């Protein structure tokens, strides 16, 4: 599927981008480039060793100096180089000395000396620190060396040796300034676990670098971790079916470094496909979303890689019972970092108990079944990131990600005809940040993302081939301006243009049948947002304007987020947001795509409405010493939802009717910490009802109406090397629709169908599970860390029913057979990791 505007999107993006680069990168001037200009201007030729001058930056343009002699005088007086005329045309340039010594004083903005600032010679294994008077010395330097100055809480300074010359004394004076702290700073550290924090706007953030342990997990994964948060559920234990405050999974929007991801999972939804070891922060926003984000009427999830350059080669590798992976960060030079990672399933070598358990869970009640002997399943992902700092005020980031899931299933032993299903995601994105001055920051970003789901299914004794395809393509360009008036108040505005195309195709070869549906939407958006913060207040107010060209609709979406602290212990918060989204997922038939991934993406049009939501929440937080109590009430209303997008498997599952959902709830989190132990308890009381007026004038419980849900957990840290975690979850059973016991089936024309009773009147049995993990750091040196982690999901191997539906009995069409979707069985996993 080709999008009409695709080429037109990227051309202006790159024109704007590189124009900005040219304008904003001229704070200093390359000595090498200046020499080339001087050569052309005066018809002379310089002779030099390239490594001696390639890193030198000048503070003024020597090519603007009027005479050649003045230029030579400048080089000799203002650099560690000496320029000597060989004859009338040739000039040699060489270092004044091979072993250069420099000294200086490091102070803060108040001219107070900084003690123990780090001074590092880039690419070398030596450096120095400043003393209590801020003084430092370095010896045995070359003219080509770059020096980096670092101090906690301050911006780093990178200088070439030549720039460390004082025109008035032998030693230079450097002033370090504090890092700019974002308005949305950390409000609660150690929120449930050491790696989890809560920001003032209510965002819960996972710091992957500080991830130590959470029960059942051996890798840091917010999509798994989020399920311990109040208000976040996965009714079928799949991270691709996470429900936030009773919303369905396609109402969660996921951005990886500003790139929208339509499916960032492996194993058809059981594990995340984004490598956590190149991801710095993973955030989940349940309400009060910033106006700069679109879509996601239930939640917004942000996965962000590190924007800081490193001068040290870093990486790691590891393996668990599902996959093996590796990652590396390469400092190409002082301004450019290359980061890359890969992961691959390991079942090509052998099957583990973890793989078997995941396989059984994923493919139960599908055409594949639970036998691994006649199937071939694999997955992999690749991440590549380039980070380039033009100077201290301008940086560029380019990201690429590829996610692949591939299944071949041989229905008949010995047959060469295989049922296939492929699920792929490809995305590339670009982000350019420019600090125009001390108050104004500009940002330009764009991305191209593609999601595809393809299946080949041989039916009727392999006499018929059914091909099904679902594809989403999206281009986006976004510009923002952020102006800081003072330490308390800032204003941000921006414009975003999205072009999204959705394709659905079904092809049958016997008898010949072909159905293709294509839709393309242009979404123009503008937003304006203000931020205010002081010691007591955090206030963010904004509005987003959207225009959707295909359906000719406009939305105005206000966003409000307020937090007030009475003192250091007690605070209150309130959020409100209105949001919309024009893509959603539906289920046409339960056997679509081999019955493995039955959901397909569709787009709003004349038959499918635009989804709109409004949400209000009010909460309070009490924290004192090691005790935390977090309480929130929410009310959410969503309009334009489709029956076929709610996961029904009863009498209304094939209807394309739209309606509304209302959800209310209370979320409570209690966390008590001590020196060696963490205890937490989360509880959610919620009610979620649906209304489809075309079939019923009354509200009835939604499929995600889990009234009571509670998680209790305990982490214990034996010492710096060994810690353990155990948790248990218990929650109400999901609603489901039973059959009329007096007459289990009925006639519908020439077909016999199940005779269902009233919608969602019954509930499954309560769900409970216990998970456990232990983590041991068995090797720790200055350069290498190595850990082994062991985890178990469903410690007591408790078999539970996640969902139930009925089909007509193949042997007796007057009877209905009950089909149960079962939970994950006892699932051990172990990981071994090395980092350097």
Image (tube, rainbow, N blue to C red):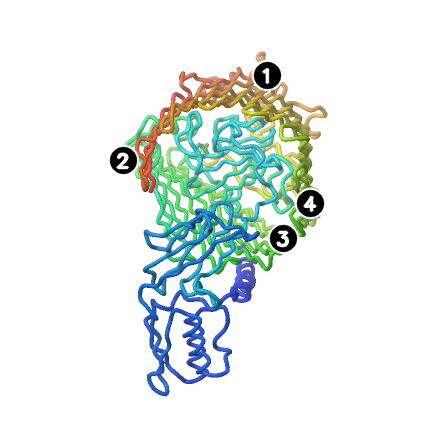
> In the rendered image of this protein, does residue 536 appear above or below residue 732?
below
Measured in 3D between alpha carbons, the distance from the residue under mark 4 to the one under mark 3, in whole angstroms, is 13 Å
> In the rendered image of this protein, does residue 547 appear above or below residue 658?
below
Q: Residues within 10 Å of mark 3 (few under 14, many from 20)?
A: some
Tell which of 669 and 323 is nearer to you. 669
Could you say which quadrant of the image residue 409 lies in? top left
Q: Residues within 10 Å of mark 4 (few under 14, many from 20)?
A: many
Marks 3, 2: nearer the viewer: 3
Where in the figure is residue 690, as x and y percent of width and height?
66, 27
> In the rendered image of this protein, does residue 54 appear above or below residue 213?
below
- For the residues labelled 4 and 2, say whether their Cβ atoms are less than 8 Å apart: no
* Mark sitting on residue 750: none
Question: Would you name the residue on which mark 2 appears?
Answer: 349
Question: Would you name the residue on which mark 4 appears?
Answer: 542
* Mark sitting on residue 762: 1
Residue drawn at point x = 42 percent, y = 20 percent: 794
Q: Residues within 10 Å of mark 1 (few under 14, many from 20)?
A: some
Q: Residue furthest bottom?
A: 88
Question: Would you name the residue on which mark 3 appears?
Answer: 482
Q: Earlier in the sequence, mark 4 or mark 2?
A: 2
Q: Is residue 320 left or right of residue 756?
A: left
Marks 4, 2: nearer the viewer: 4
Q: Residues within 10 Å of mark 2 (few under 14, many from 20)?
A: few
Q: Earlier in the sequence, mark 4 or mark 1?
A: 4
């Amino acid at each position: 599927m080709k999008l009409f505007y695709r080429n037109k999107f990227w051309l202006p993006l790159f024109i704007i981008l590189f124009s900005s680069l040219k304008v904003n990168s001229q704070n200093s001037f390359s000595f090498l480039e200046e020499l080339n200009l001087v050569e052309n201007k005066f018809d002379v030729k310089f002779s030099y060793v390239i490594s001696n001058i390639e890193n030198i930056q000048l503070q003024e343009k020597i090519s603007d100096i009027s005479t050649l002699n003045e230029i030579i005088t400048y080089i000799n007086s203002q650099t560690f180089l000496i320029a000597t005329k060989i004859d009338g045309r040739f000039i040699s340039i060489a270092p004044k000395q091979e072993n250069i010594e420099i000294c200086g004083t490091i102070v803060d903005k108040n001219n107070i000396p900084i003690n123990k600032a780090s001074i590092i010679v880039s690419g070398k294994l030596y450096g120095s620190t400043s003393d209590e008077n801020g003084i430092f010395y370095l010896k045995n330097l070359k003219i080509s060396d770059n020096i980096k100055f670092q101090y906690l809480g301050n911006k780093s300074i990178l200088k070439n040796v030549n720039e460390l010359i004082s025109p008035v004394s032998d030693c230079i004076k450097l002033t370090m300034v504090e890092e700019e702290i974002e308005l949305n700073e950390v409000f609660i550290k150690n929120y449930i676990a050491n790696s989890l924090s809560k920001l003032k706007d209510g965002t819960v953030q996972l710091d992957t670098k500080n991830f130590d342990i959470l029960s059942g997990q051996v890798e840091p994964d917010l999509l798994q971790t989020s399920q311990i948060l109040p208000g976040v559920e996965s009714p079928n234990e799949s991270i691709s079916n996470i429900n936030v405050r009773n919303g369905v999974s396609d109402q969660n929007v996921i951005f990886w470094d500003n790139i929208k991801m339509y499916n960032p999972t492996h194993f058809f939804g059981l594990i995340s496909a984004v490598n956590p070891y190149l991801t710095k922060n993973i955030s989940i926003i349940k309400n009060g979303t910033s106006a700069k984000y679109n879509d996601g009427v239930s939640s917004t999830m942000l996965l962000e890689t590190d924007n800081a350059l490193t001068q040290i080669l870093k990486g790691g590798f590891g393996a668990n019972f599902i996959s093996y992976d590796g990652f590396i960060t390469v400092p190409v030079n002082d301004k450019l970092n290359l980061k890359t990672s890969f992961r691959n399933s390991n079942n090509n070598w052998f099957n583990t108990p973890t793989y078997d358990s995941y396989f059984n869970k994923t493919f139960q009640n599908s055409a594949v079944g639970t036998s691994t002997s006649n199937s071939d399943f694999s997955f992999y992902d690749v991440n590549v990131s380039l980070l380039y700092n033009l100077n201290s005020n301008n940086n560029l980031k380019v990201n690429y990600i590829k996610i692949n899931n591939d299944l071949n299933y041989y229905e008949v032993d010995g047959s060469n005809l295989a049922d296939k299903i492929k699920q792929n995601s490809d995305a590339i994105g670009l982000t350019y940040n420019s600090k125009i001055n001390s108050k104004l920051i500009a940002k330009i970003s764009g991305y191209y993302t593609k999601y595809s789901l393809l299946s080949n299914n041989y039916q009727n004794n392999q006499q018929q081939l059914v091909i099904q395809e679902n594809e989403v393509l999206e281009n986006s360009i976004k510009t923002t301006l952020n102006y800081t008036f003072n330490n308390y108040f800032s204003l941000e505005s921006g414009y975003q243009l999205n072009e999204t195309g959705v394709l659905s195709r079904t092809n049958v070869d016997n008898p010949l049948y072909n159905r293709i549906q294509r839709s393309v939407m242009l979404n123009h958006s503008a937003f304006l947002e203000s931020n205010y913060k002081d010691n007591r207040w955090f206030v963010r107010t904004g509005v987003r304007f959207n225009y959707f060209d295909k359906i000719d609709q406009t939305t105005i979406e206000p966003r409000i987020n307020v937090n007030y602290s009475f003192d250091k212990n007690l605070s209150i918060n309130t959020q409100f947001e209105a949001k919309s989204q024009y893509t959603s997922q539906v289920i046409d038939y339960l056997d679509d795509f081999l019955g493995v991934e039955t959901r397909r993406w569709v787009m709003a049009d004349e038959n499918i409405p635009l989804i709109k939501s409004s949400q209000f929440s009010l909460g309070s937080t009490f924290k004192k010493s090691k005790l935390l109590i977090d309480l929130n009430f929410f009310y959410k209303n969503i309009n334009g939802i489709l029956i076929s997008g709610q996961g029904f498997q009863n009498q209304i599952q094939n209807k394309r009717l739209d309606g509304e959902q209302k959800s209310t709830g209370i979320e409570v989190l209690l966390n008590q910490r001590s020196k060696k132990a963490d205890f937490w308890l989360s509880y959610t009381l919620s009610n979620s009802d649906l209304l489809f007026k075309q079939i019923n004038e009354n509200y009835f419980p939604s499929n995600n109406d889990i009234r009571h849900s509670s998680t209790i957990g305990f982490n214990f840290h034996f010492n710096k090397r060994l810690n353990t975690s155990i948790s248990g979850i218990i929650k109400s059973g999901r609603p489901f629709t039973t059959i009329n016991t007096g007459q289990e089936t009925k006639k519908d024309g020439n077909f016999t169908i199940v005779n269902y009773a009233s919608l969602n009147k019954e509930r499954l049995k309560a769900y409970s599970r216990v998970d456990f993990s232990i983590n041991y750091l068995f090797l720790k040196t200055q350069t290498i860390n190595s850990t082994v982690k062991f985890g178990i999901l469903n410690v007591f191997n408790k078999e539970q029913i996640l969902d139930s539906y009925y089909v007509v009995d193949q042997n007796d069409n007057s009877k209905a057979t009950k089909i149960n979707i079962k939970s994950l069985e006892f699932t051990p996993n172990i990981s071994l990791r090395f980092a350097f």
